[in-house]
Amino acid sequence: MAKRKAAKHKESKRNTVAYCLRCRKKTTMIKPKLCKMRRGRKRLAGHCAKCRTKTSLIVGKSFKM
Ligand SMILES: [Zn+2]
């Protein structure tokens, strides 16, 4: 079941899952922050919920928090 509700709060409450190099698996991202890259690409930067290592996730142009 995929729910896609618009978040009321500005900070994303949904689980953003990114690959953590330290845990070597996909983990939940803490406080994902949207960064713009060149060519209109976007990237989510945050921290691993388990080991607090920086994680990032490349998302599409149309991605919205
Ligand atoms: Zn980790």
Image (cartoon, helix red, strand yellow):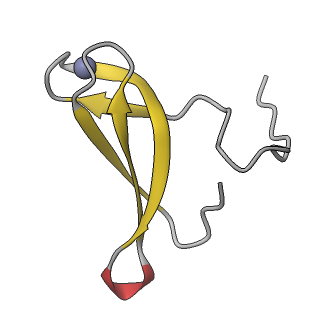
| Mark count | 0
Work out which quarter of the rendered image holds the C terminus and state it.
bottom right
Residue pictured at 60% horizontal, 62% vertical: 63
Residue pictured at 65% horizontal, 61% vertical: 64
Left or right? Give the position of 50 relative to 12: left
Q: Looking at the image, is 17 positioned above or below residue 62?
A: above
Left or right? Give the position of 63 relative to 17: right
Relative image position of residue 60 (x, y in whole percent) = 50, 65
Ligand 1 found in image quarter: top left
Left or right? Give the position of 9 relative to 64: right
**Looking at the image, which is closer to me, 60 or 46?**
46
Residue pictured at 45% horizontal, 30% vertical: 30
Work out which quarter of the rendered image holds the N terminus and state it.
top right
**Looking at the image, which is closer to me, 58 or 65?**
65
Q: Quadrant of residue 7?
A: top right
Relative image position of residue 13 (x, y in whole percent) = 68, 33
Left or right? Give the position of 16 relative to 19: right
Q: Residue furthest bottom?
A: 39
Relative image position of residue 47 (x, y in whole percent) = 34, 33
Relative image position of residue 29 (x, y in whole percent) = 43, 31
Residue pictured at 31% horizontal, 83% vertical: 38
